[in-house]
Image: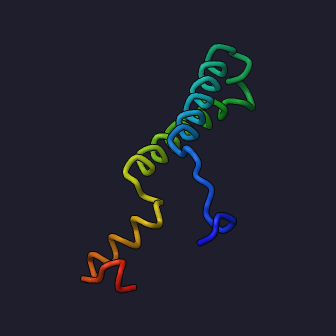
Amino acid sequence: MTDATRPVQVPSLRIADAGLALWAVALLVVLAVPDLRTGDRAWWPWTCVAGLLLGVLARLYLRRGRGNAAAAVLSSGAQSGETSSTR
């Protein structure tokens, strides 16, 4: 695999943490300003809560190491009795 075809390494956990922090700040702002959570905007706090919950799930998924294609190939090869050198 050449350098041009290799996937870019990104800090996924840091990105998930940044998203969680932004949703937390948004929730605090929505709760602090009553006009942002009354009337037609009553759903805004729940949107922030949903963003936080999805961020926690994403962080758990990333922390477990899922989404790593190389590890997935190795684990499927180990289950079938093959090694990566026989592929």
Q: Residue furthest front?
A: 2
Q: Residue at x 60, y 25 (%)?
A: 27
Question: Is residue 63 positioned above or below 23 on the image?
Answer: below
5 to the left or right of 58:
right
Q: In which quarter of the image is the N terminus?
A: bottom right
Q: Is residue 74 above or below residue 37?
A: below
Q: Which of 56 and 28 is in front in this view?
A: 56
Which residue is nearer to you in this view: 61 or 51? 61
Q: Which residue is drawn at 58% across and 40% down?
A: 15
Q: Tell me residue 25's x, y (percent).
A: 61, 23
Quadrant housing residue 74: bottom left
Q: In this view, does 63 lie above or below 66?
A: above
The image shows residue 77 at horizontal and vertical percentages of 33, 78
Q: Which residue does the image show at 66% across and 22% down from the upper left?
A: 30
- Measuring 39% from the left and 64% from the top, which residue is drawn there? 71
Q: How is the image coloured?
A: rainbow
Along the line of sight, the residue nearer the viewer: 75 or 48: 75
